[in-house]
Amino acid sequence: MCRLFGSMTRSNLRRTVLSVLGVFAVCQTFPTPNDRDRMMKAEQFEFMGGNLLLTNKETKVNDILMKIKTKEIAEGMETGKFPPAMHFFSAKELIKQSTVFNILRKLPKGAALHLHDYALLNVDWLVKNATYLPNCYICFTAAGGIRFHFFLRSPQKRLSKCSEWVLLEEYRHQLENVTEFDNSLFRNLTLVTENPEEAYQSQNIIWRRFEDLFKAASSLISYAPVFKTYFYEALREFYHDNVLYIEIRALLLPVYELDGTLHDKEWSIIAYQEVAKRFQHDNPDFMGAKVIISTPRKINNSEMKTTIFEAMKFYKTFPETIAGFDMVGQEDVGHPLWYFKNELLIPREVGVNLPFFFHAGETDLEGTSVDENILDALLLNTSRIGHGYSINKHPMAKRISREFKVPLEVCPISNQVLMLVTDLRNHPAANLMAEGHPMVISADDPAAFGACGLSYDFYEAFMGIGGVKAELTTLKQLALSSIKYSAMSVKTKAECIKLWLRKWDEFLDEVLDMSNRDEL
Amino acid sequence: MCRLFGSMTRSNLRRTVLSVLGVFAVCQTFPTPNDRDRMMKAEQFEFMGGNLLLTNKETKVNDILMKIKTKEIAEGMETGKFPPAMHFFSAKELIKQSTVFNILRKLPKGAALHLHDYALLNVDWLVKNATYLPNCYICFTAAGGIRFHFFLRSPQKRLSKCSEWVLLEEYRHQLENVTEFDNSLFRNLTLVTENPEEAYQSQNIIWRRFEDLFKAASSLISYAPVFKTYFYEALREFYHDNVLYIEIRALLLPVYELDGTLHDKEWSIIAYQEVAKRFQHDNPDFMGAKVIISTPRKINNSEMKTTIFEAMKFYKTFPETIAGFDMVGQEDVGHPLWYFKNELLIPREVGVNLPFFFHAGETDLEGTSVDENILDALLLNTSRIGHGYSINKHPMAKRISREFKVPLEVCPISNQVLMLVTDLRNHPAANLMAEGHPMVISADDPAAFGACGLSYDFYEAFMGIGGVKAELTTLKQLALSSIKYSAMSVKTKAECIKLWLRKWDEFLDEVLDMSNRDEL
């Protein structure tokens, strides 16, 4: 349907837009069947990306893409196995076989703006590389979890509620089946399981597991040599998934050396900066990374005050690396934003700029104090809304987000795995997409979910959330929005758009080539 | 929060409303934390029923109700067993123990406007009464289903793909465990099962089972003596559930006598009319019932033409009993509304009034021809929208429904059991409730879901869909809307409101009494 606007001149388009908008006037009287075409055009025009003009080349690619997409949806309906309607853990293998997914992998997706420090990179890398480094010790927690630490010598002291530390090299040596053991590490470092419905019977249960695997992963990643390599490899993973730039929420936990030296937050920021620069140097067609300083939402007011002053300092000292500030952890059990209003208003009061990127509305519960986060995030001047899952239940907040273009960072797989929604066609972003609401797609914690990069989430957004209506224009809009709403400087954004346009053109050519070679 | 408006005079209210609406003006500039109170009031004002004034008595009852509600929600969060987040089959026993539910049972709920002929009444009645009538035969289908028929003499002829007919009286006589057999009949006549996720792996699978149980039930109910008693008992069930009036979608299938005489559609209409009048005579504080003539959406265009002419005739002949016309059956596999546009426009063309009550948007799929039903139902001038589950994905249709007050008939349990949504806090009506969108709550096919009357659906709407924000005003608005949007005449509506107000007042007294006696 978007093609309606595809081959038009700009003045034609303007006329069409006006006639489409005329439907609103029609609405003064009850519409009749004669209004059907205009109303359907208006609805498609309002859909995310529906107002973008398509070039001839784009129109061709859209035809190819939509033909494949429609076929895959029909197949899903027929077999009853439609990936966006299934749990990602069972859907993943089907998605990998999808032609749409393989096109989306090639798509230049712009920026990934909602990611967390310890769940960026495929866990395979951690298991197969980090845990094989010399001096890596493991211990087992009473609750069935694992922790790692690198020691120069075998330590005498245990962690509380944990087994003794065992040198992994020795431990593996005495095992009959190392592969099975490594698989068990993988399972411990992700939420992936065969029967998620049985394993995770409530949101609280899965959140405790989620927090535990973060502790396990961070105990590995906080070792200085792992820390830097992990981030470099993560950048590589996103880069290979055709992501141009990322922003990560980082706790900036202490990083340690083998001799026990502990590094502070500043060291971590400089490390992120240095690795990102090195990666950009190695891959000039990558736009880099920024850090959103994050703190657990369970801290108290005086800790928050200290944290805010620290964040202001870091934002001033490292303007190229620090994007702003956020809070992390399960919203339903943490302090609501308003609890910290005095602390969060400090930057405004002292006249210092500190952009906020608040998680808000990552909840199914309406009307609780936590549910007020969505409005409060906006009142506290957030630059984007992390998740914003419940925004449709808040018409006032929704209007502000729309009118003032405060976009939502939508993370489909995360919301499904963390049990906010089962069938992704029901994701609240489906309504928002239909209304062209400002949003970007992100991956949250791909490593924890057994995903990788951004393409799986783009698949769910394009096939599930967007329904049959999402077309090439929708993908283009999502990519462009991710650059527009990033924390990059105006100058860098312009460069990024230029780079993206080049990659977009290459992508279009590649799809046409594949189609010509009958590879689609 | 509604109490903000509770103790106000009307002129005070007007001022408050204006100041609340002033928030929209504030939105011309980005709001600040100082706007918080006003914005939250505005949001609560926009919520369904948020603009209703509460009397002092209502305010007291609201306080009692909200205290219990908040406690039950907190308990649900703590135990991880919150009924609206669970499948109704597992939630039912918990709901029965809920004090909120027991208050909702007493609530005068107004009208139930979306119900189907063969799934009105608790299946227990069918099993324990209808199947124990003399001359009741049963046979078993190859697919594992059952069919009934009443014969004067043992029949020679089998149904296609079925076992021989067996006289139930004799069959039961030779059974060791009749209770177990009767339970199996119950299971065959409902969708109820212990593990619905395993039993029903796709929407298509559950819809085939759903259609089969309709066939089983209709084979019992189509026997003339059962037909009339079934409807009388159904009215009694809704009446005891404090419903004042119902509208049923009826297929008007042939009804037969023991001697084989077949009755036509007109006979059925007269039977419905006669039974409803008798019930009203026996219970003068009941407002009666109307029939929406319904036809399967799988028929062809020429059959539809005949059906429409017939419906116009019946609507003219039985204006007190016939409310209008609709189509039934799984939307995703049937013809879309637009397929029948020529036939459905006949009444308009010939200048005859035939109100439509179209099912539309009972689908998770966006952008298919079936998904266009939601807009087409409106363009074809529907009086209400059956389900309208997908309306949020259609901003144009949503605006029309809102501006011209074409309400949605929301059936929470039906949508969950038929696999459109898992956690009812995610039901699209949650957004609509937050926006005060016109809607009524109904039960669809309570018998098939193991529900009874309207209270279970009210519970899901009040506790799940409405979240913590739904208060007594929400319930009042839902009840009043159900009367307003019914097919009753203006005069009958006025009577109904009068009756409802009396019952509402009794309800308030009863809650206060129970509270005073510490029974809540």
Image: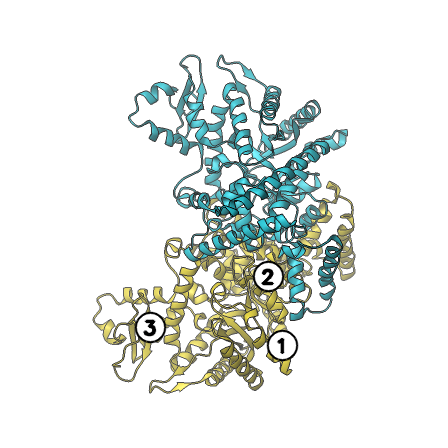
Chain colours: A cyan, B yellow
Q: Circle 3 sits in a helix, a strand or a loop, which is it? A: strand
Q: Kindly identify which residue carries mark 1.
A: B495
Q: Is residue B491 left or right of residue B337?
A: right
Q: Kindly identify which residue carries mark 2.
A: B475
Going from N to C along the chain, the mark reached first, 1 or 3, is: 3
Chain bearing tag 3 is B
> In which quarter of the view is residue A290 placed?
top right
The reply to whether label 1 and label 3 mark residues of one chain is yes
The reply to whether label 2 and label 3 mark residues of one chain is yes
Q: Is residue A426 above or below residue B161?
A: above
In the rendered image, residue B154, in percent from the top left (x then y), is placed at 25, 81
Mark 1 Cα within 10 Å, few/some/many (few <14, many 20+)? few
Residue at screen point 70% across, 51% down: B41
Whether tag 2 and tag 3 are in contact, CB under 8 A, the answer is no
Q: Circle 2 sits in a helix, a strand or a loop, which is it? A: helix
Q: Is residue A351 above or below residue A98?
A: above
In the rendered image, residue B215, in percent from the top left (x then y), is placed at 38, 72
> In which quarter of the view is residue B286 placed?
bottom right
Q: Kindly identify which residue carries mark 3.
A: B147
Going from N to C along the chain, the mark reached first, 2 or 1, is: 2
Chain bearing tag 2 is B
Instruction: Give the CA separation, mark 2 to mark 3.
Output: 40 Å
Residue at screen point 38% across, 21% down: A168
The residue nearer to you, when weighing A345 against B408, is B408
Q: Quadrant of the N terminus of chain A?
A: bottom right
In the rendered image, residue A257, in percent from the top left (x then y), is placed at 51, 15
Instruction: Give the CA separation, mark 1 to mark 3.
Output: 42 Å
Q: Circle 1 sits in a helix, a strand or a loop, which is it? A: helix
> In which quarter of the view is residue A499 placed?
top right
Tell me the number on the disc at residue A427. none
Q: Is residue A514 above or below residue A348?
A: below
Look at the image and tell me whether residue B109 can be seen: yes
